[in-house]
Image: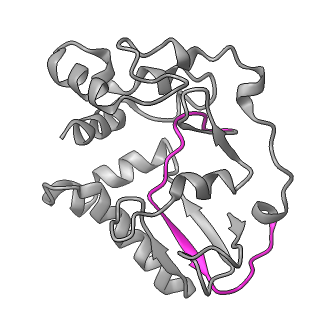
Amino acid sequence: MFQIDKDDKVLQGFETLLLIGPDEPNFWEKFKNSNEYSHIKKDPLDHWSKNKINALAKKFGAKPFFPFQDNPALPFYSWALRSRRMWASPIKLLVHDTRGLMVSFRGALAFKQKLNGDLINAKSSPKPCNSCTAPCLVSCPVGALTEEKYDVEKCQTHIKNYVDSPCKQGCLARRSCPIGKDFRQKKQSSFHMQAFVR
């Protein structure tokens, strides 16, 4: 959560942005029991997220935003950096103070009023990478994640072509982070990886 700057063009007219991520590991069981998971073939998680977050937006009088929407594509990465709870990791993926490299977002709510509370007023947490040996830099079997860039094509090609790749059960670089690596179930990670290679 953060207070919106006056010059933030996408969020003009709003005062506070609340980023929404899954409550793992509880999230996965709730999604698996949903109508979207059972009946929607294309992007069921996006449909589920929209339904849940749109309902919250209506309840609290907020405007919803989604990381998977286009026109315009939204800067969730830079928004996350403004929260003082997330940073760029050595491999440039976001890292969270308690979720590590497993941090992700399903949406955000923009409020027209300034919200106060612990999330806004809390001091910035220390960046977890400062005291870490950075196993994320050496965990990718094909070197797709480096300090310079994330080679998406190399990553996808490896997962598609290497039948027994452990990457199919979740990104090894993400799982190497000592913070939060046990939050996400392997079945959930497999679901995300299948969507990623499609």
Question: Range of the magenta residues?
Answer: 98-117
> Vertical placement of 23 versus 2: above or below?
above
Residue shown at the point (67%, 38%) measured from the top left: 98
User: Which picture quadrant has residue 11?
Assistant: bottom right
> Vertical placement of 93 versus 13: above or below?
above
Out of 182 and 156, give the one closest to the viewer: 156
Relative side of 6 to 45, left or right: right
In the picture, the quarter occupied by the C terminus is top left
Image location of residue 168, percent across then percent down: 28, 24
In the picture, the quarter occupied by the N terminus is bottom right
Out of 155 and 102, give the one closest to the viewer: 155
Relative side of 3 to 59, left or right: right
Image location of residue 64, percent across then percent down: 47, 75
Colour pattern: one colour
> Vertical placement of 34 versus 85: above or below?
below
Residue shown at the point (39%, 69%) measured from the top left: 72
User: Which picture quadrant has residue 122?
Assistant: bottom right
> Vertical placement of 10 versus 77: above or below?
below
Magenta highlight on residue 100: yes
Magenta highlight on residue 24: no
Magenta stretch: dominant secondary structure? loop
Relative side of 15 to 175, left or right: right
Image location of residue 9, percent across then percent down: 57, 76
Image location of residue 14, percent across then percent down: 63, 83
Residue shown at the point (47%, 22%) measured from the top left: 173
Out of 83 and 153, give the one closest to the viewer: 153
